[in-house]
Structure formats: structure tokens, C-alpha cells
Amino acid sequence: MGIARSVSITLEQTLPAVNEEAAFVGELRAGSEDAFAYLLTVYQNPVFNLVWHIVENSADASDVLQDVFVKVFKGIKGFNGDSSLRTWIYRIAVHEASNHRRGWIRRHWREPFSVDDQESPSAAAASEAASSERSPYQVLEQAEREVVVKRALASLAPPYRTVLVLREIEGLPYEEIAQVLGLAEGTVKSRLLRGRELLRRKLAGYVGKEHV
Amino acid sequence: MWARNMFETCLEIRHHFSDYMDDFCAPEARKAIRYHLSFCEVCRDRLDQWQMVREELRALPRRQVPQELALRMRVRVSQRVHDNLLSRLWVHCENALKPFLIPATGGVLSALICFCLFMGSYVAPASDDPDVTVQWATPASVQLLAPMDFSTDDNTVVVLTQINAEGRAKGYQVLSGQGSPELMQRLDRMVYFSTFRPATMFGRPTDGQVVLSLRRITVRG
């Protein structure tokens, strides 16, 4: 487990370099607990963020996250290196989250649907205002903007939302998004175009108020 | 000149905003868009809005995994790592046996100490009756042979004699030697007038056998 350890010391919470990835995957395949601990350290937050934007609920995102890493653990022996480790993990995460969301909708389709998170934005803003250099008004305004943007993003149809999250929030290139979603690059581009336009329309009267 | 005119309408040019923002446009298309934006204020505003939406999305706070969840996942991974039959069996055995280890060790040690103390002070009971042996089994033996003249003409006669619990002969059988009528008569008298010590079993007299080997014996009374 020398590799995973040394990597974790020198590149804390960063992705393994491409040439190191094969050795890292080897460690994972060998069932090294330290390698998996490192994998969790590096990927748990991005994957949680991605999953949260798809399932729109912290509790569900937690469940999905656990399932994702159990699947990663089980399936690492079948990982053949056709794509990068990150792409492979994101693909599992997107599939798990989409499946969970479909199941969730089936179970709760009669219940009123809310895209709001359980957390209160004003409470989060208040705690941030106490520690921030910005004025309380600015902090609250920022918190409200975040809520509106999150709401608008959550209201998009899942195909557009997933592509937007992968591109704008996770910063994946088109090619990697196509691999994660199992789509052609052209489809990714068209969904991105459509998603951006839908989001612009939803936020037209709100976003960039201060700039316009 | 061609690049400048490659898009006919604003709607057409807006279809390329996404690629333009991501730098995925062909150089000719990029030139054409720039040219169009230089005079079309509506499209310029539209592109600004797109970019603002992007900034808003990128400014969204990133979700962090709660510490408790991170710990739970590490525990699950650890469980998966050790999830094979032998490991599970070993853990189950260890868990089942650990509570008994100290009591069992104490019990064995106590038993050992008690055994040593008992064996150290144990003396085999001696029999009060010196004639009765306390051995498990003793063979029958001759106590007193009858005083008879006995000649076998240099041939050995071997006789198997059955002895009862009172030390008397019940019968006999000549195993080897010449069985002449005279010899048999003398053997009858000798066997039936001799006395024997009976065989014993756990100190009690019981039936037994004695083998007598006779050769040129002359006994005068």
C-alpha cells in the first residue's frame, strides 16, 4: 500500500495523475483498505455534490453515495481502464442517482414536491454572516440568490440538469460528459445548449440584477 | 467576408453561444459570432446573460459529505474488505469465544490444581486381610501336591487342571504324554488329593486353571 499512502501525503485530496492511476487502480483491485480510504477522501465530496444535484435531497444523496462506493468497491475488479477512474465513478454515480430518483418519484408522486433542501438558507446565511467580512445584507442576498439558482436548476428536466451540473459545476469536458452519460458528444452539446437556454429563461428576471 | 456572413439571423447565431462560451467553436464560426456581436446589442445582452448564469452556477456552494456519513462509508468499505468466509468465521469465533476465555482458563487451572492436590494426597487403600489380594485378577496356583509315587518313564506329562473357587480340582486334561491306565489312576489320585490356591478376581475367589508339568516324580509319604 505504499503508493496510496505516498500519494495521500503528497497530493492530499487531489486526483491521482494519469500515470499513477493504473498503480492506484491496482491497489484498489488488490483490496487495499488504505487505497479505498484515499479514494473516498478524493471522490466523496464531488460525487456527493453531483448526486445531490440529481436527487435534490441530502438524505437521499447520502444513501446514494454509500451505494455508489459499494458498487465501486464491488466493481473495481471489472474496471478495465477504458475511461478514467473519475469518469467511471461519475458514471456509476449518475446511474445510481437517476435510478434512485426514478424510484423516489414512483414512491412519492402523490406527495407535494419541493426542491428546497432541508436546510434553511437564512440560518446558513446568518452563521456565515457572523464569520464573513461581507455585510449581513450581502450575505443574505447571496444566500437568496443561491436558493433561486438551485431552485431553477432543480426545475430543469433531469437530462438537461445532469449535463449542466457535469459541465458547469463539476467542470468536465464534453468528451468526458459523453462517456459518463453514454451519449454522443453532439447530444451532450445540444442538451447543454438547451439546458443553458432554459436556465437563462428561468433566471432572466433575477440573475445579474446587479450587473444589468 | 464569408465568415462574417455565415449566420443569417440572430436565432441562428444564438445556437452557437454554448460552443462559443466553451471554446468549442470552429475558428470561422468564432469570427462570425464576434462580428455579429460587435453590432447586435440584443445578442450581446443574451450572451452576457448566459455567462452570468454560468457564473451563478459555478458560484453555488459545493456540498460536503457530513463527517458522520464519511465515517460510515469508511466502516462499510472496511467491512467489505474483510467480507470473506474465513475472515467472517474467524471474527465470529473470536467474538463467541472471547467472553469465555477468562472463565474457561480459570476453570481449567482450578481443575488442574484440584487434581494435583487430590493425587498428591491419594494413597491406594491397603487390604486388611493379608490373604486376599486387592489386585484385579490373580491366577490359581498349587498349594499342596498329594504325596504319591509317580513315574513317567522319562516322559513329561503336562496336565491342565480346573480349580474351583474353594481350591479343589474339578477335573483335569492331559495335554501331552502317554495316557496309560496306570498313569491315569495315579493322576486321578494325585489331582484330587492335592490342594490349590484358587484364582481371584477383584479379591474374590473364582474358578481357574493350573498347568502341571510332571516328570519322574517319586514322592514317599
Image (cartoon, coloured by chain):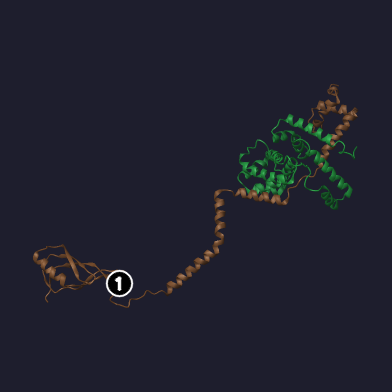
Chain colours: A green, B brown
Q: Residue at x 16, y 70 (%)?
A: B191
B128 displayed left or right of A145: left
Front residue of A138/B198: it is B198
Q: Is residue A14 above or below residue B195?
A: above
Amino acid carrying mark 1 in the image: Gly
In percent of width and height, residue B43 lies at 87, 29
Chain to which mark 1 belongs = B
Q: Which residue is mark 1?
A: B203
Which image quarter: residue A158? top right
**Label 1's element?**
loop
Q: Is residue B213 above or below residue A65?
A: below
Give the quarter of the figure containing the C terminus of chain B.
bottom left
In percent of width and height, residue A106 lies at 70, 39
| Number of marks in picture | 1
In percent of width and height, residue A153 lies at 79, 38
Residue occupying the far left of the picture: B182
Q: Is residue A58 above or below residue A202?
A: below
In percent of width and height, residue A21 lies at 67, 41
Q: Is residue B31 visible?
A: no
Q: Residue at x 54, y 59 (%)?
A: B97
Which image quarter: residue B99? bottom right
Which image quarter: residue A44? top right
Front residue of B212/A159: it is A159
